[in-house]
Image (cartoon, rainbow, N blue to C red):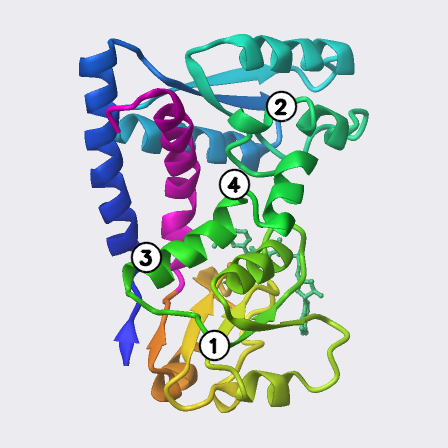
Amino acid sequence: MQLLKGKDVAAFHSHRMAQQIQAVREKMGIDPELAIVVVGDDAPSAMYAASMQRTARSVGLKASIYREAADISEADLLALIDRLNEDPMVFGILLMMPLPKSIDSQCIINRIDPSKDVDGLTDANIANLYTGRAGFVPCTPQAVMAILDYYHISLSGKEVVIVGRSNVVGKPLSQLCLQQNATVTVCHSRTNDLKAVCQRADVVIAAAGKAGLVTGDMIKPGAVVIDVGINRVDGKTVGDVAFDDAALRAGAITPVPGGVGAVTTMMILENVVCGIARIATIL
Ligand code: NAD
């Protein structure tokens, strides 16, 4: 059984990005920036923003946090997005969710220039994903694909079963797997016989947010198991897969923590670098 270590995948991307960003600074004399917008005082958002800023700085990328009060008007927030859209040094805009209830989130998201929408949340980028055009993809599905790619796991012709159909994980993942020529089944809370569906999978991707939902007996011997879930149980972080049992049957499996989550923030930065690459012929 092979342990698919997200930390190794993240380290690979981090090293490559640091070199690319250094080359941009030296050869083009520019200081590219990721703009992180935090509205209100949601504690997880503030923590995620600070951690994203640290990770960006660790690869040499400038990351600024724009903190706005919870009672900011929609017009003022749209004006901030417009300013960031127009700033040529801003290559990525990351809007922390959730926004205060008084604000129409989708309206603000869709104001982000799709070429700076490094979280792949705008309708334009969602349409790009579903039509197979180039664009930004949400970071968690992208992290799953980065892990498969790093470990040379091909999806072509494989049966992939995704457990979870959310807009940020399950649905975009299904499109990315289709693009890699997998035969994809998406399961959800109303799926009749989850065990039977998972048992036929060459690759199981669990993204339901239910600790221990995917048990060892659901795994076909030799299958690849990717656990996206993050759950707190008895003060410990665990995934959606009953790891010890599943690992006895899987050919390869991601741990939690240290699996998909370790790669996710790196994918946002990878998207910023992609944006820079559009104007920088040196990359
Ligand atoms: P969500 O709550 O929006 O969606 C969960 C999905 O799971 C739904 O489509 C639901 O139908 C399905 N589901 C729930 N119970 C089920 C069951 N018993 N059988 C089959 N399907 C079931 O959640 P989300 O935002 O997609 O996140 C899913 C999990 O991934 C969560 O644990 C979340 O914390 C985690 N997550 C991890 C990362 C990361 O970086 N690793 C990023 C985002 C989300």
Span of residues in magenta: 256-283
User: Measured along the vertical axis of the image, is residue 157 above or below residue 146?
Assistant: below
Q: Which residue is mark 3?
A: 6
Q: Which residue is mark 2?
A: 112
Q: Position of residue 13 (x, y in %)?
A: 28, 44
Numbered mark located on residue 157 in the image: 1
Report the Cα–Cα distance between label 3 and label 4: 25 Å
Q: Residue at x 20, y 23 (%)?
A: 22
Q: Amino acid at mark 4?
A: Ala
Mark toward the viewer: 1 or 2: 1
Q: Position of residue 1 (x, y in %)?
A: 28, 81
Tell me whether circle 1 and circle 2 mark residues in contact (CB < 8 Å).
no
Mark toward the viewer: 4 or 2: 4
Q: Residue at x 40, y 91 (%)?
A: 221
- At mark 3, the secondary structure is helix
In this view of the protein, can residue 239 be seen by the observer?
yes
